[in-house]
Amino acid sequence: MELRRDPISGNWVIQEEDDGLWPVNGKCPFCPGNEPLSPLTIYSHVNGNGSWQVRVTPHLRPLYRIEGEPQRRAEGMYDKMRGLGAHEVVIENPAHQARLSQLKDENVAQVLRAYVSRISDLKKDLRFRYVTVFRDQGVSAGQDMEHPHSQITATPFIPRRVVYELRSYQHHYGVKERCILCDVVAQEIADEVRTVEYDGQFIAFCPFASRTPYETWILPVTHHSTFEEDLTTWDRQLQFARFLKSILRRMESVEPSFHFVLHTTPNVNAKLDRNGHWETLDEDFHWHFEILPTSVPKSISYSLKEVFPATGTRGGGSATGGCHWGVIIHRQKGLYRDS
């Protein structure tokens, strides 16, 4: 498996022969008792009965391999490298059918704690420039296993969408010396037009220029650039867990399938990052989750990876699909609110 860079769009594309099948022999590898099907536990939270409540394990069909170096190289004018990175699965609870929105507040907070722990640990690896969390819920969102789970990826590149965001945040701060999302939050609270929910610590709203109906962003009201440095205390994790559950339930009432992805700061200590390139990152960036409903059948995994699986490794192949950051034209639906 290797990554090839599209010189036109700047996307990194995964080239592989076949994505294969889950090696599970008809059993769910995430259910209690089937741990031998995914034997390596990277992180776990054990409840009072001695059983795991949250478990993190390497993905059984990883998009990236953690061993070695990127081996960046050229093929004429083109760039390519090994499929270096990390790809992990966060098994959110032992129950096979229990969605994140259905868990107790404390259990959701433990999932958030797992996110914080794994992102912090992966950012210690200087080969990785970007680490994120994503959930694909529902068949149309590309959910690949029925058992509710999240995924974490770490890559030696910053996804193109995130690069655009970083430049936009940096430019706004350079002109106004303010965080652009802090300005957006202030206006959304004042307008009370697109706000979905607000509890004083966190806010959820539909963006002014939504890409899909019911697209929703969730973020802290006060400025915090980095997710894993903000949600460090149990009280903070529990508060966000309650808020997140409420938003997910609202979303599921109107669009049961969606992508859910974290935008946080890149790994500024990574090998390939230029010194001083993100000098104002703490001041200009604002972590947030984005929820993108998927009403189009057979959409595939979002994951913010900006890499699209392609069939064939020799002739270039044709992309099988992906979340393309193009212009999406749609009729704006009304905000979803409690009746």
Image (cartoon, rainbow, N blue to C red):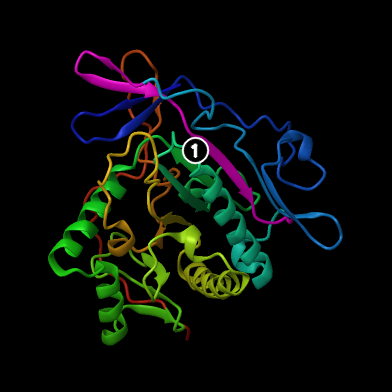
The residue lying at 33 percent from left, 42 percent from top is 159
Visible residue check, residue 12: yes
Left or right: 36 in relation to 18 = right
- Give the vertical position of 170 relative to 183 (above or below): above
The residue lying at 29 percent from left, 73 percent from top is 182
Residue 74 x %, y %: 27, 16
Hey, which quadrant is residue 170 in on the image? bottom left
Point out the stretch of residues depicted in magenta.
Answer: 72-95
Amino acid type, callout 1: Asp
The residue lying toward the viewer, choosing from 276 and 262, is: 276
- Give the vertical position of 31 relative to 258 (above or below): above
**Is 100 one of the magenta-colored residues?**
no
Disc 1 element: loop
The residue lying toward the viewer, choosing from 69 and 51, is: 69
Identify the residue under disc 1.
Answer: 125
Left or right: 35 in relation to 171 = right
Residue 330 x %, y %: 25, 61
Which residue in the rendered view is the most extreme toward the front?
Answer: 275
Q: How many labels were placed on the picture?
A: 1
